[in-house]
């Protein structure tokens, strides 16, 4: 697993700090992780869960909510609504720079926020909560001793997890505005609820309430003797591995990691985008989503055809279509035209009919298989027609590629 530091803005223009855990090979899916109330992205449990998911080929973005960790902003000005807003900002960041998240994961109040935000993340097919309250108002008891001061003074210092935090009354007011039960019933995504029976921060009854409200497909996993923060490494790694195994059955039904809306072709017919971490490339060609890659022998993962494979495919497809068009026009008995193409490079001095005398040149070898009742004369004519394929002519003609930088 490798961690990539990322930064993105929330709706207030404040910079949020994140870490993207990337698997060793091209990600088969992306997940967004929301940590617990007052925690940070560097919480050991969050790190271990991200590691377990990355080991299963799933990239994971975890980040500090506004006012926490390395993110900008004042924690006192945040609330449950701002957490949900931060989550959606993280979703947009993934969509614009990597791929839309397929999996949403939240720990403690982060899980409650994930449930609230899920309806606005159409790409997500699976949602998981870990030790999460069944309602945002559950966190009110965490600062019960300071609630009176918050109501009267509008601001108070609250001890949360052994650390002092300045809170404002607006946090309490915001909690009262959310009705999570309605959001759960309309989730329409696979739901996994993980909870420890001995959790003394968020009682197990919360898991029961979430499970009862949710529609199928839904699952429950007991975290046995784990504490609320999953401080034991074996507990957080177990949660991560179970999550990866559970989510895998739903990823097959997820949209491809790259969707049409994520890669904008603008005024062009074709676009391609390659991210760090390998050669796997998202392609939109004629409105269709493709994946290109390089073989493992040159540093790729072989998850898609190479650029030269695609070029060979263009020549093969164009040739086959051209032969079919000709046969239809001449009313020939052609059942099918199969075109096989092989690309390679040869030394110019080994090519008798090439204009170049030095260096290496590209060579495409093309083989035609024509099925149908055709005379020898017709077959020879089809061989000539193959050279009239538009892609063939483009490869043999004068070609210019003009490149410009797009506005950032």
Image (cartoon, rainbow, N blue to C red):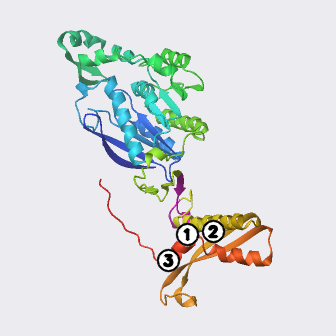
**What's the residue at 33%, 63% (across, down)?**
404
Q: Residues within 10 Å of mark 2 (few under 14, many from 20)?
A: many
Which residue occupies the foreground of this view, 144 or 8?
8
Q: Is there CB contact under 8 Å for labels 2 and 3? A: no
Cα distance between the residues tagged 1 and 2: 8 Å
Q: How far apart, in angstroms, are the residues tagged by discs 2 and 3?
A: 16 Å
Q: What residue sits 47% from the left and 36% below the top?
A: 233
> Along the polypeptide, which appears first: circle 1 or circle 2?
2
Q: Position of residue 397 (x, y in %)?
A: 49, 77
Q: Position of residue 364 (x, y in %)?
A: 59, 75
Callouts 1 and 2 close, C-beta under 8 Å: yes
Regarding residue 89, the answer to whether it shows in the image is yes
| Dot 2: element | helix
Rendered image: mark on residue 391? 1
User: x, y (%) of residue 20?
Assistant: 40, 45
Residue beneath label 3, please? 397
Indicate which disc residue 319 carries. 2
Q: Earlier in the sequence, mark 3 or mark 1?
A: 1
Whether tag 3 and tag 1 are in contact, CB under 8 A, the answer is no
State yes or no: residue 111 in magenta: no
Q: Residue at x 38, y 49 (%)?
A: 4
Is residue 359 left or right of 363 when viewed as pictured? left
Residue 203 appears anywhere in the view: no
Residue 319 percent across, percent down from the top left: 63, 68
Q: Which element is circle 1 on?
A: helix
Q: Image check: 360 left or right of 44? A: right
Residue 368, picture quadrant: bottom right
Range of the magenta residues? 289-300
Image side of residue 172 versus residue 198, left or right? left
Q: Quadrant of residue 370?
A: bottom right
Q: Residue furthest left?
A: 153
């Amino acid at each position: 697993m490798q961690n990539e530091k990322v930064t993105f803005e929330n709706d207030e223009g404040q910079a949020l700090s994140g870490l993207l855990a990337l698997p060793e090979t091209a990600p088969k899916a992306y997940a967004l992780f929301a940590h617990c109330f007052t925690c940070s992205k560097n919480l050991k449990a969050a790190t271990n869960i991200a590691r377990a998911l990355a080991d299963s080929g799933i990239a994971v973005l975890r980040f500090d909510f506004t006012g926490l960790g390395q993110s900008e902003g004042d924690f006192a000005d945040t609330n449950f609504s701002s957490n949900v807003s931060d989550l959606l900002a993280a979703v947009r960041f993934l969509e614009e720079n990597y791929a839309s998240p397929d999996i949403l994961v939240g720990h403690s109040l982060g899980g409650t926020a994930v449930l609230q935000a899920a309806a606005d993340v159409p790409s997500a097919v699976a949602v998981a909560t870990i030790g999460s309250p069944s309602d945002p108002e559950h966190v009110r008891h965490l600062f019960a001793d300071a609630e009176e001061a918050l109501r009267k003074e509008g601001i108070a210092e609250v001890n949360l997890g052994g650390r002092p935090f300045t809170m404002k009354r607006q946090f309490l007011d915001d909690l009262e505005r959310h009705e999570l039960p309605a959001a759960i019933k309309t989730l329409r995504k696979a739901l996994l609820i993980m909870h420890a029976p001995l959790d003394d921060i968020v009682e197990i009854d919360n898991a029961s309430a979430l499970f009862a409200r949710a529609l199928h497909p839904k699952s429950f996993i007991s975290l046995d003797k784990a504490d609320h923060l999953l401080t034991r490494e074996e507990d957080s790694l177990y949660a991560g591995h179970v999550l990866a195994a559970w989510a895998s059955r739903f990823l097959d039904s997820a949209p491809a990691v790259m969707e049409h809306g994520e890669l904008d072709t603008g005024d062009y017919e074709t676009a391609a985008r390659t991210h760090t971490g390998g050669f796997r490339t998202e392609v939109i060609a004629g409105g269709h989503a493709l994946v290109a890659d390089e073989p493992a022998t040159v540093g790729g993962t072989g998850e898609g055809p190479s650029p030269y494979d695609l070029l060979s495919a263009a020549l093969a497809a164009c040739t086959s279509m051209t032969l079919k068009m000709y046969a239809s026009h001449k009313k020939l008995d052609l059942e099918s035209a199969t075109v096989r193409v092989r690309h390679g490079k040869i030394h110019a001095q080994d090519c008798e009919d090439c204009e170049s005398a030095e260096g290496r040149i590209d060579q495409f070898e093309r083989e035609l298989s024509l099925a149908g009742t055709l005379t020898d004369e017709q077959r020879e004519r089809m061989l000539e027609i193959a050279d009239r394929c538009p892609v063939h002519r483009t490869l043999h003609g004068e070609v210019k590629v003009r490149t410009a930088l797009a506005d950032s």
